[in-house]
Amino acid sequence: MRSREPAWASPDNPPRARGPSRVPARSRARHCGNWCRPRCAASGLPGFGDGVALLDLLAALPGARREAFVLSRLMGLPCAEAAELSECPVGTVRSRVARATLVGLLAEADAPAVRGHVGTRIQPPSRATGPPDLSVPRPFEQLSNTPGGTCYCPSYTPRGNFRSEGVPDVFFVDTIEVAGLGNRSYLAGGEREAVVIDPPRDVDQVIAAAARRGVRIAHVVETHVHNDYVTGGPELARLTGAAYLVPAGARVFFERTPVRDGDRTVVDAGAGLALRALATPGHTPHHTSYVLEEAGAAVAVFTGGSLLIGTVGRPDLVEPRLTEDLARAQHASARRLADELPDETAVLPTHGFGSFCSAGRAEGGATTIGKEKSANEALGRDVDTFVADLLAGLDEVPAYYAHMGPANAAGPAPVDLTPPAVADADEIAARLAAGEWVVDLRNRVAFAEGHVAGSFNFEAEGQLATYLAWLIPWGKPVTLLAESAGQLAAAQRELVRVGVDRPAAAATGEPSAWVRGGEPLAAFRRATFADLADLVGRHPGDGPVVLDVRRASERAGGFIEGSVHIPVHALHGRLGEIPAGEVWVHCAGGMRAAIAASLLDAAGREVVAVDDAFTAAEKAGLTVRTV
């Protein structure tokens, strides 16, 4: 039977050992043996040297391995199994440390910076290389010193050393950037408790941000059922025990707290913080914004897909018959926010930073109600003019959006970010032969120089999630090829945000290892618009096929005379429409041209990728027309 901690056990009165230790001497010497508060999850795991505690262990592990270790081996692991893993006596290992605290250890070791809403970058503590400097406030405390070694256990005490400049001491608002999708999530709170607005699916980064602040996530709220990404709301609420607030009119199939217009939720009583719900339909029929109030006064408003910076969220993502009505509702909702809130209220939208959920590109990173009154299109035009202009300017909708709303309404499953199965050259070839997608994540220069024939290039540093999810047939197995384990892990994280959950397989390293012995790597040329102009000048009337893969809205601003237009997101199904001959493919800057070139190369076409800004086309001497 598993031994249990007696109710009377304490740091000053540890329980007696139950018989001789079965642990090797080298492990016994490293285990502190004390009963710490919070419990020491693992104070002496083998293989990392004497005195290694949980903090030091996490710092020593590579990022992906560290995350997998904490999330899958420590959090909730039965005591006996944790003891066996760490070679510590049964009854002296406690694995049930608060999830937020454990993920906070990850943040302490190697976490990305989080941005405050005033634009100040909040840096996490530097990666630990030894025992922490206890003279500096940090989320760790030295709880015991014993002859067997030093035990550093996590302490979950609120601390003020991460305050953003310009944010009052009694509360904070941190921005969690999801740059690949052009979205933002927010963590807001006081000294003890916080609320998360529109969390991304990979919630570990949110929990880490809360741990850095030393606050408990008490509420998770959604402004709407999202159509551009998979939410992490249900999982974050489950992991933290937070209340999950969702607009009452949204049709969802999971347990939540319905929110109606005017509802007020206390965020942190000590700081006098509360959220007040404002119905702001338009982006969706049941969209709700949340006003952050301090002592009853509005200080910020989380507007989701309603009022954005200079624009609004698009109204055409629900169903076509509702689009015009929702556009009119957007105008009314923007006016309501402007009329009811003070000019100095910070406007904190979820969309508008590159997301296709935005009706237009947001300019700048911060704004207020007062600024939007003079700059936002919804607040400067009458409703009929606004609606006509809004509907006329709507761009294409990514195909994968059709799957996001249903997934969010059903309640997404937790993510699995563990490394995929490793594929060797034979398996890669077999998957290609079976019609599966093999995606090379390396940069477009490296891909053009040499790649697995038949593979597609979606750069990890580009808008990977948006364009891969847009182009790939939904549910098609995908194998990822990356130059490093870190690049692979980052890509997995990006892809789960749009519902591409588990790669079928993966490989890292050099492309020469991804092909069977004797098989050559495929390659194609890269060029500039000046190179294209030179070729056209030398062969007037008999030049190459010029393929423009930009969106229709971009092409309307100017296109190369005689070019063929097929947007990159439609190219895979329209390859047969491209005339015979060598194809020079371009976009606005090079990334989408590289995707298109890889599709053409895989189809056996002779292709040249124009890796250049379109603004250089006319300067190079090419004839640019406008529609």
Image (tube, rainbow, N blue to C red):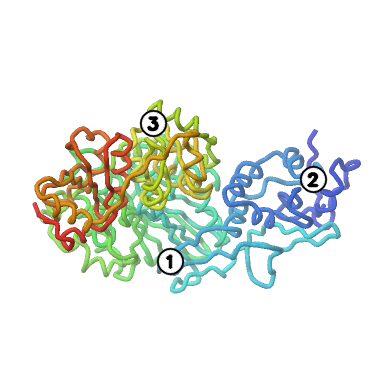
Q: Residues within 10 Å of mark 2 (few under 14, many from 20)?
A: many
Residue under the image location 13 percent in, 55 percent down? 537
Mark 1 and mark 3 lie on one chain; the one further toward the N terminus is 1
| Viewer-nearest residue: 403 or 169 | 403
The amino acid type of the residue labelled 1 equals: Glu
Residue 342, position as x, y percentages in the image? 30, 68
For residue 358, above or below residue 601: below
Which callout, 2 or 3, points at the residue further toward the start of the chain?
A: 2
Asked if the residues shown at circle 1 and circle 3 are in contact, with their CB atoms under 8 angstroms apart, the answer is: no
Which circle, 2 or 3, is nearer the viewer? 3
**Residue depicted at x 28% and y 58%:** 308
Side of 443 where 62 appears, left or right = right
> Which residue type carries mark 2?
Cys
Residue at mark 1 to residue at mark 3: CA–CA distance: 49 Å
* Residue 617 percent location from the top left of the image: 19, 58
Inspect this view and state whether residue 623 appears: yes
Residue annotated with mark 2: 88
Residue under label 3: 476
Q: Disc 2 versus disc 1: distance between alpha carbons?
A: 48 Å
